[in-house]
Image: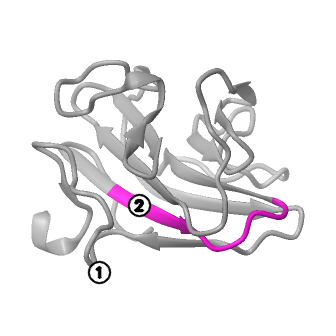
Amino acid sequence: ASIAMDSGKWYFEANANQTWGYGEFGIMPTSGALPSTGYIGAAGVNGYAYQTGGSLYNNDVSTSSGITAASVGDIIMCAVDIGAGKIWFGLNGTWFNSGNPASGTNAAYTTLSGTYSPAVSIYNGSSGLTVNFGQSPFTYTPPSGFVALNTYNL
Protein backbone atom coordinates (compact mmCIF):
# COMPACT_ATOMS: atom_id res chain seq x y z
CA ALA A 1 0.00 0.00 0.00
CA SER A 2 1.09 3.57 -0.50
CA ILE A 3 0.28 4.87 3.01
CA ALA A 4 2.63 4.03 5.86
CA MET A 5 1.48 3.71 9.46
CA ASP A 6 3.81 5.22 12.06
CA SER A 7 1.14 6.09 14.64
CA GLY A 8 -2.59 5.66 15.15
CA LYS A 9 -5.16 2.89 15.01
CA TRP A 10 -6.06 1.55 11.58
CA TYR A 11 -8.54 -0.91 10.10
CA PHE A 12 -8.71 -2.53 6.66
CA GLU A 13 -10.25 -5.62 5.03
CA ALA A 14 -9.65 -8.07 2.20
CA ASN A 15 -12.13 -10.19 0.29
CA ALA A 16 -11.02 -13.75 -0.47
CA ASN A 17 -11.95 -14.15 -4.14
CA GLN A 18 -10.17 -17.50 -4.51
CA THR A 19 -8.88 -20.07 -2.09
CA TRP A 20 -6.72 -22.32 -4.25
CA GLY A 21 -3.10 -21.53 -3.52
CA TYR A 22 -2.41 -19.25 -0.59
CA GLY A 23 -2.51 -15.55 -0.02
CA GLU A 24 -1.19 -13.51 2.86
CA PHE A 25 -2.73 -10.28 4.09
CA GLY A 26 -1.10 -8.10 6.72
CA ILE A 27 1.65 -5.55 7.22
CA MET A 28 5.39 -5.29 6.75
CA PRO A 29 7.99 -2.72 7.78
CA THR A 30 8.65 0.10 5.37
CA SER A 31 12.38 -0.16 6.06
CA GLY A 32 12.99 -3.39 4.23
CA ALA A 33 12.25 -5.42 1.17
CA LEU A 34 10.68 -8.79 0.58
CA PRO A 35 13.20 -11.62 0.60
CA SER A 36 13.60 -13.89 -2.40
CA THR A 37 10.87 -16.11 -0.94
CA GLY A 38 8.49 -13.19 -1.48
CA TYR A 39 6.01 -13.47 1.35
CA ILE A 40 5.08 -11.16 4.22
CA GLY A 41 5.63 -13.63 7.04
CA ALA A 42 9.03 -14.85 5.80
CA ALA A 43 12.12 -15.01 8.01
CA GLY A 44 13.89 -11.67 8.34
CA VAL A 45 11.00 -9.59 6.97
CA ASN A 46 9.37 -8.94 10.38
CA GLY A 47 6.00 -8.80 8.68
CA TYR A 48 2.75 -9.93 10.29
CA ALA A 49 0.26 -11.83 8.17
CA TYR A 50 -2.87 -13.94 8.02
CA GLN A 51 -2.49 -16.76 5.50
CA THR A 52 -5.73 -17.80 3.82
CA GLY A 53 -4.97 -21.46 4.54
CA GLY A 54 -5.64 -20.78 8.23
CA SER A 55 -2.40 -19.60 9.86
CA LEU A 56 -0.76 -16.45 11.18
CA TYR A 57 2.88 -15.80 10.27
CA ASN A 58 5.71 -13.66 11.63
CA ASN A 59 9.37 -14.28 10.74
CA ASP A 60 8.57 -17.70 9.27
CA VAL A 61 6.94 -18.86 12.50
CA SER A 62 3.33 -19.87 12.08
CA THR A 63 0.47 -20.52 14.42
CA SER A 64 -2.81 -22.11 13.48
CA SER A 65 -4.40 -22.49 16.92
CA GLY A 66 -7.76 -20.72 16.85
CA ILE A 67 -7.25 -19.57 13.23
CA THR A 68 -9.83 -20.38 10.56
CA ALA A 69 -9.04 -20.83 6.85
CA ALA A 70 -10.73 -18.46 4.41
CA SER A 71 -13.28 -19.58 1.86
CA VAL A 72 -14.35 -17.79 -1.30
CA GLY A 73 -16.31 -14.68 -0.35
CA ASP A 74 -14.96 -14.44 3.20
CA ILE A 75 -13.87 -11.07 4.57
CA ILE A 76 -10.49 -10.95 6.29
CA MET A 77 -10.21 -8.16 8.87
CA CYS A 78 -7.06 -6.46 10.15
CA ALA A 79 -6.77 -3.90 12.95
CA VAL A 80 -3.42 -2.29 13.78
CA ASP A 81 -2.58 -0.16 16.83
CA ILE A 82 0.88 1.18 16.06
CA GLY A 83 1.27 3.02 19.39
CA ALA A 84 0.54 -0.11 21.43
CA GLY A 85 2.49 -2.35 19.02
CA LYS A 86 -0.47 -4.66 18.42
CA ILE A 87 -2.21 -6.28 15.47
CA TRP A 88 -5.42 -8.34 15.26
CA PHE A 89 -6.77 -10.53 12.46
CA GLY A 90 -10.28 -11.85 12.02
CA LEU A 91 -12.66 -13.44 9.58
CA ASN A 92 -16.28 -12.54 8.79
CA GLY A 93 -16.85 -10.27 11.78
CA THR A 94 -15.10 -12.42 14.40
CA TRP A 95 -11.61 -11.65 15.70
CA PHE A 96 -9.35 -14.69 16.09
CA ASN A 97 -8.69 -15.99 19.61
CA SER A 98 -11.38 -13.76 21.14
CA GLY A 99 -9.38 -10.67 20.24
CA ASN A 100 -10.90 -7.26 20.89
CA PRO A 101 -9.07 -4.35 19.27
CA ALA A 102 -11.44 -1.81 20.86
CA SER A 103 -10.34 -2.88 24.35
CA GLY A 104 -6.80 -3.82 23.28
CA THR A 105 -7.07 -7.46 24.36
CA ASN A 106 -5.90 -10.77 22.85
CA ALA A 107 -3.95 -9.31 19.95
CA ALA A 108 -2.45 -11.76 17.46
CA TYR A 109 0.94 -10.09 17.97
CA THR A 110 2.17 -7.47 20.44
CA THR A 111 5.67 -6.92 19.07
CA LEU A 112 5.19 -4.23 16.41
CA SER A 113 7.79 -1.49 16.44
CA GLY A 114 8.45 1.10 13.75
CA THR A 115 6.61 2.08 10.59
CA TYR A 116 4.54 -0.43 8.61
CA SER A 117 2.56 -0.56 5.38
CA PRO A 118 -0.24 -2.96 4.54
CA ALA A 119 0.86 -5.73 2.21
CA VAL A 120 -0.48 -8.69 0.27
CA SER A 121 1.47 -11.65 -1.03
CA ILE A 122 0.06 -14.44 -3.14
CA TYR A 123 1.63 -17.73 -4.17
CA ASN A 124 0.94 -21.25 -5.38
CA GLY A 125 -1.22 -19.87 -8.16
CA SER A 126 -3.51 -17.72 -6.03
CA SER A 127 -4.67 -14.33 -7.27
CA GLY A 128 -7.64 -13.88 -5.06
CA LEU A 129 -7.50 -11.04 -2.54
CA THR A 130 -9.21 -7.68 -3.04
CA VAL A 131 -8.14 -5.16 -0.40
CA ASN A 132 -10.36 -2.39 0.97
CA PHE A 133 -8.71 0.49 2.84
CA GLY A 134 -11.96 2.44 3.04
CA GLN A 135 -12.28 3.39 -0.62
CA SER A 136 -15.53 1.39 -0.50
CA PRO A 137 -17.82 0.83 2.48
CA PHE A 138 -16.39 -1.79 4.83
CA THR A 139 -18.29 -5.04 5.24
CA TYR A 140 -17.76 -4.85 9.01
CA THR A 141 -17.69 -1.80 11.26
CA PRO A 142 -14.16 -0.89 12.35
CA PRO A 143 -13.50 -1.40 16.06
CA SER A 144 -14.15 1.64 18.24
CA GLY A 145 -11.22 4.05 17.93
CA PHE A 146 -9.92 2.56 14.65
CA VAL A 147 -10.25 4.31 11.28
CA ALA A 148 -9.86 3.46 7.60
CA LEU A 149 -6.33 3.73 6.24
CA ASN A 150 -6.86 6.53 3.72
CA THR A 151 -5.70 10.10 3.18
CA TYR A 152 -8.85 11.54 4.79
CA ASN A 153 -7.83 10.04 8.14
CA LEU A 154 -4.19 11.11 8.07
Quadrant of image for the N terminus: bottom left
In this figure, what is the number of numbered marks? 2
Q: Which residue type carries mark 1?
A: Ser
Q: Secondary structure at mark 1?
A: loop
Residue of label 2? 13
For this orientation, the residue located farthest to the right is 124
Cα distance between the residues tagged 1 and 2: 10 Å
Please state, as top left, top right, bottom left or bottom right, where the C terminus lies in the image: bottom left
Foreground pick, 114 / 123:
123
Where residue 125 sits: x, y (%)?
A: 87, 70
Numbered circle sitting on residue 53: none
Q: Residue at x 69, y 27 (%)?
A: 64
Residue shown at the point (37%, 19%) measured from the top left: 106
Residue 18 located within the stretch drawn in magenta: yes
Along the line of sight, which residue is nearer the eye, 104 or 45?
104
Mark 2 secondary-structure assignment: strand
- From this view, report whether residue 32 is shown above or below residue 141: above
Please tell me how crowded label 2 is: few (under 14), some (14-19), or many (20+) other residues with Cα within 10 Å: many
Q: Is residue 72 magenta?
A: no
Q: What residue did someone put label 1 on? A: 136
Q: Is residue 146 left or right of residue 92?
A: left
Residue count near mark 1 (Cα–Cα under 10 Å), binned few <14, some 14–19, many ≥20: few
In which quadrant of the rendered view does residue 82 lie? top left
Q: Amino acid at mark 2?
A: Glu
Question: In the rendered structure, which disc, 1 or 2, sits on the residue that comes first in sequence?
Answer: 2
The magenta span reads 12-21
Q: Is residue 101 left or right of residue 61?
A: left
Expressed as whole percent of the image width and height from the top left, the position of residue 151 reads: 18, 73
